[in-house]
Image (cartoon, rainbow, N blue to C red):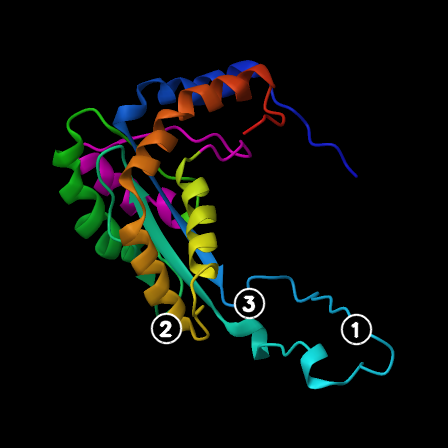
Amino acid sequence: MEALETIPRNRYRNKTSRYRSAEKNYGSDESKFVLTGNDGHVRVWRRPGERFMPNTVHKTVPFGGGSIMVWGGITVNTRTDLVVIRNGGLTARRYIDEILKPQVIPRANVIGQNFIFMQDNARPHIAHIVTDYLDDQNIRKMYWPACSPDMNPIEHVWDQLGKRVRRRPNPPITTEQLAQALVEEWDHFPQDALRRLIRSMPRRCTALVQARGGHTRY
């Protein structure tokens, strides 16, 4: 196994210092969810002679079952709608029209002044028209060093959201059902859980700095 290179501590300090005022952070990101929820390697225990019996055969979903791309944003006191990104990939123009204008900007007043908008360095996020638009709206952006650990708190939400969907009595079997389930689980995700997660970020970042970008207990 190849070891990951750690990065000088001051690089993490520059990034993680922005987390000290966790109440003002506005975390956002996209995530892809797949229907199958596994890598295709399903193991079934069976006795000799049962190899092709129906109850010992795991049926696969053709073409991997499909996937859904979503976007969301969270703060200590509110959240955006969960946006399902349909009809192709996310472009810079779509990012402005379908996400920033209807979701991010209207909630800026709820958060208050001097909040910091968190987004990674995905191509649509750093396009000139997006940067210019956010500057025109007086939205402060968190500096996001290349190849740095993703400390956006929403990454933990995606993990929990996927688990909540998989635990449903009737898990989704189509992409439309998956999209609906994700939106419903997002809407019912406890705000207290989001608040605790965001407020834990200073501790997480301190641990990251002390580990020089290496693994932490989080």
Q: How many marks?
A: 3
Residue 160 left/right relative to 140 = right
Q: Residues within 10 Å of mark 2 (few under 14, many from 20)?
A: few
Q: Badge 3 is on which residue?
A: 36
Q: In the image, residue 6 lies at what x, y percent?
A: 65, 24
Q: What kind of residue is marked 2?
A: Glu
- Identify which residue is drawn at 41% across, 35% down: 153
- Identify which residue is drawn at 60% across, 19% down: 212
Q: Badge 1 is on which residue?
A: 46
Q: In the image, residue 195 lies at what x, y percent?
A: 31, 32
Q: Which residues are magenta?
A: 124-151
Q: Is residue 59 magenta?
A: no
- Identify which residue is drawn at 16% across, 26% down: 113
Q: What kind of residue is marked 1?
A: Arg
* Distance between the alpha carbons at the discs numbered 2 and 1: 34 Å
Q: Residues within 10 Å of mark 3 (few under 14, many from 20)?
A: some
Decide: is 167 above or below 123. Answer: below
Mark 1 in CB contact with mark 3 (< 8 angstroms): no
Res 121 seen here? no
Task: Give the farthest residue toward the front.
Answer: 47
Q: Nearer the viewer, mark 2 or mark 1?
A: 1
* Distance between the alpha carbons at the discs numbered 1 and 3: 22 Å
Q: Name the quadrant containing residue 184.
A: bottom left
Q: What kind of residue is marked 3?
A: Thr
Q: Earlier in the sequence, mark 2 or mark 3?
A: 3
Residue 66 left/right relative to 139 = right
Q: In the image, residue 155 lies at what x, y percent?
A: 45, 42
Secondary structure beneath label 3:
loop
Q: Quadrant of the C terminus?
A: top right
Residue 168 left/right relative to 5 = left
Q: Check residue 176 in the rendering and tell me which mark sits there, or answer none.
A: 2
